[in-house]
Image: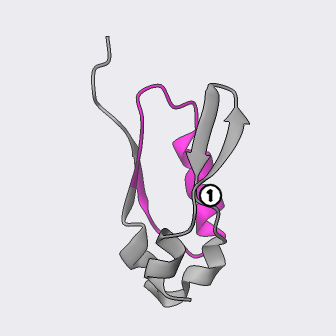
């Protein structure tokens, strides 16, 4: 599957804790050797409750070695 085809999929919506959120469903393993070109780093928003260590452990199961950090934006 081509990278462009993955990224151009229709956006789906789901009801989540903080309201309705859009997402693009795809399986991490389909990206193959080009995965480093698609996801280079992940910056978690200042209100994100995701534990960066847990996310890193999850992604490592699919062979990703991505820098994950929390945003330093002040959102008073």
Identify the colour scheme used.
one colour
In this rendered view, identify the residue nearer to me: 11 or 46.
11
- Quarter of the image with the N terminus is bottom right
Q: Is residue 5 left or right of residue 57?
A: left
Residue 11 appears at what percent x and percent y?
57, 56
- The quadrant in which residue 73 appears is top left
Q: Is residue 30 above or below residue 67?
A: below
Seen as rendered, the residue at the extreme top is: 76
Seen as rendered, the residue at the extreme front is: 10
In the image, residue 44 lies in the stretch drawn in magenta: yes
Please give the range of residues in magenta: 42-68
Residue 45 appears at what percent x and percent y?
42, 34
Q: Is residue 21 above or below residue 8?
A: above
The residue indicated by pointer 1 is: 57
Seen as rendered, the residue at the extreme left is: 73
- The quadrant in which residue 75 appears is top left
Q: Is residue 42 above or below residue 18?
A: below
Residue 13 appears at what percent x and percent y?
65, 45
In this rendered view, identify the residue nearer to me: 56 or 27.
27
- Quarter of the image with the C terminus is top left
């Amino acid at each position: 599957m081509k990278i462009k085809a993955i990224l151009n999929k229709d956006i789906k919506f789901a009801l989540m804790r903080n309201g309705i959120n859009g997402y693009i469903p795809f399986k991490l393993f389909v990206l193959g050797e080009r995965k480093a070109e698609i996801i280079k780093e992940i910056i978690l928003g200042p209100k994100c409750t995701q534990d960066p260590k847990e996310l890193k452990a999850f992604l490592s199961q699919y062979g990703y070695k991505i820098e994950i950090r929390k945003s330093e934006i002040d959102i008073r």
